[in-house]
């Protein structure tokens, strides 16, 4: 049943190759992706979640060595909701923006863009649905290759060098993860995530090396060198996928693969320190950055820090709730900001916030989108980021009290205090871009599809803020 979530984008990609009209390709792609949300909703309403499905089994000497297993449980239900609800707006936005981008390049095809996007979306869903480490890594490499190709064909700047740098870092991260997963298999004798339980005690080096691999995938500070150029120079609609959704999969990997094996104190202290360092570094870099897309890329490093903080709790239930809600809130807010930045680039063909002002006088909707996105990132109501930061803070304080260690208390307070940086770089960007006298070089209008995408994502930010119990409840319903 769940395999259709992966198959729908893949079948659509094949269908588009048979169609000459690029507009119809965009319509088919957007329509196909829009069916994922109701289909997922039907599964959640009418099936007994959690559940898994086995499709292929490979046996050696009578033992099952590999099985293609997909499923839905408490760990992936909210990320799945996030991806299926956000993607249609990104696809809707893409047609007009990518036509503009391809005219700038003087080469390329919108049809190729949508084919790569559909395959990439299928890879994202495959990573989330996978319940077997081989399946998990296969889909992960699937989306890495399509991500690299999208940057290579449609990116900005020295896109060839940037795409290869991104690919190299991703492959290094994958190799390190594979070493860790192979070691885990050597100790527990299974590829299936259902057998990853605290009853197995792994050597610390196995957990730490796998953590480093996922840290590269996330772009956590110290392993982040690939992230600013890749996220800022990717085609802008894809930046809204790469930044919040794909880097968040690294944190999902930690939650899915490593969480059961870590000792609580060591796990908490490492992730608290690493998460806080990412928040501070990303926030300070965003505070002095003038390229709007690069500013948002550094902001992603900072938000990765919050994902690491959510994983620091000894309770896997608390970590799951905090991680899932922050994944959702960050995805909506960062996608909104990247798409608003894309509208700015479309209108002005300029990314330097020092030379941009007066957006509110010319494009009110885009201005509201900028303000809404930064308010949500800063954790202010009435947006989902408010609930997200509240949940993260509550989880950290509860865990800190339970541990009782002075260093955990101090790191928790320091991490919470560092959130002020998000508000500071948001205020700086909004003050420069949105207010002031309007520039005469703004184009007269922005396509209606791009505007509609911004409206839908803003609505998602507000609706999920008003019904946090529904989001958290979906996790509770999916628990064993």
Image (cartoon, rainbow, N blue to C red):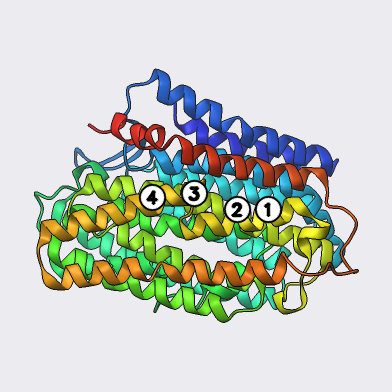
Residues at discs 1 and 3 in contact (Cβ within 8 Å):
no
Q: Element under label 1?
A: helix
Kind of element beneath mark 2: helix
Residue at the spot 52% in from the left edge and 75% down from the top edge: 226
Which residue is labeled 1 in the image?
A: 368
Q: Quadrant of residue 146?
A: bottom right
Q: CA distance from mark 4 to mark 2?
A: 34 Å
Can residue 55 be seen in this snapshot?
no
**Contact? badges 4 and 1 (CB < 8 Å):** no
Which mark is first along the chain, 1 or 4?
4
The residue carrying pointer 2 sits among few (fewer than 14), some (14 to 19) or many (20 or more) residues within 10 Å by Cα, namely many
Residue mark closest to the camera, 4 vs 1: 1
Q: Position of residue 369 (x, y in %)?
A: 66, 53
The residue where tag 4 is placed is: 136
The furthest residue to the top: 46
Relative side of 217 to 151, left or right: left
**Can you identify the residue that label 3 sits on?**
381
Q: Quadrant of the C terminus?
A: top left
Task: Tell me if mark 1 has few (under 14), some (14-19) or many (20+) residues whose alpha carbon lies within 10 angstroms of its own.
Answer: some
The CA distance from mark 3 to mark 2 is 10 Å
Direction from residue 129 to residue 358 in the image, left or right: right
Q: Looking at the picture, how far across and down is residue 60, in whole percent?
A: 24, 43
Q: Quadrant of residue 416?
A: bottom left
Please indicate, yes or no, whether residue 239 appears anywhere in the rendered image: yes
Mark 2 = which residue? 372
């Amino acid at each position: 049943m769940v395999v259709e979530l992966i198959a729908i984008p893949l079948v659509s990609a094949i269908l588009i190759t048979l169609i000459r009209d690029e507009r119809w390709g965009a319509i088919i792609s957007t329509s196909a992706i829009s069916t994922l949300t109701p289909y997922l909703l039907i599964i959640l309403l009418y099936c007994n979640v959690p559940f898994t499905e086995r499709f292929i089994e490979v046996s050696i000497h009578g033992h099952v060595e590999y099985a293609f297993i997909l499923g839905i449980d408490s760990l992936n239900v909210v990320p799945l909701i996030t991806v299926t609800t956000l993607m249609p707006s990104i696809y809707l936005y893409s047609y007009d923006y990518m036509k503009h981008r391809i005219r700038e390049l003087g080469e390329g095809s919108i049809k190729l863009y949508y084919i790569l996007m559909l395959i990439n979306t299928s890879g994202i869903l495959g990573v989330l649905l996978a319940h077997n480490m081989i399946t998990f890594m296969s889909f992960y490499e699937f989306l890495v290759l399509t991500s690299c190709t999208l940057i290579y064909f449609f990116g900005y700047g020295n896109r060839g060098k940037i795409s290869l740098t991104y690919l190299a870092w991703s492959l290094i991260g994958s190799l390190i993860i594979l070493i860790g997963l192979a070691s885990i298999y050597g100790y527990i004798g299974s590829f299936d995530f259902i057998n990853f339980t605290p009853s197995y005690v792994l050597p610390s080096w196995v957990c730490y090396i796998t953590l480093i691999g996922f840290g590269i995938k996330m772009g956590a500070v110290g392993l982040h060198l690939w992230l600013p150029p890749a996220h800022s120079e990717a085609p802008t609609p894809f930046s809204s996928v790469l930044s919040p959704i794909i880097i968040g999969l690294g944190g999902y990997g930690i939650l899915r693969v490593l969480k059961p094996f870590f000792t609580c104190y060591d796990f908490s202290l490492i992730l608290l320190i690493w998460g806080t360092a990412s928040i501070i570094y990303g926030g300070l870099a965003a505070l002095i950055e003038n390229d709007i897309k690069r500013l948002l890329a550094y902001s992603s490093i900072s938000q990765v820090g919050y994902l690491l903080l959510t994983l620091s709790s000894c309770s896997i239930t608390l970590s799951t709730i905090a991680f899932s809600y922050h994944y959702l809130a960050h995805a909506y807010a960062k996608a909104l900001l990247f798409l608003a930045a894309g509208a700015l680039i479309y209108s002005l063909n300029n990314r330097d916030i020092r030379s941009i002002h007066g957006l509110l006088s010319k494009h009110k909707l885009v201005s509201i989108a900028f303000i809404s996105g930064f308010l949500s990132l800063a954790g202010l109501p009435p947006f989902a980021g408010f609930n997200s930061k509240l949940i993260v803070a509550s989880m950290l304080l509860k865990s800190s009290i339970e541990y009782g260690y002075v260093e955990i208390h101090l790191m928790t307070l320091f991490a919470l205090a560092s959130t002020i940086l998000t508000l500071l770089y948001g205020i700086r960007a909004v003050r420069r871009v949105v207010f002031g006298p309007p520039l005469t070089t703004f184009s007269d209008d922005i396509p209606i599809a791009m505007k509609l995408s911004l409206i839908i994502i803003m609505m998602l930010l507000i609706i999920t803020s008003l019904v946090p119990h529904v989001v958290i409840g979906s996790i509770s319903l999916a628990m064993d």
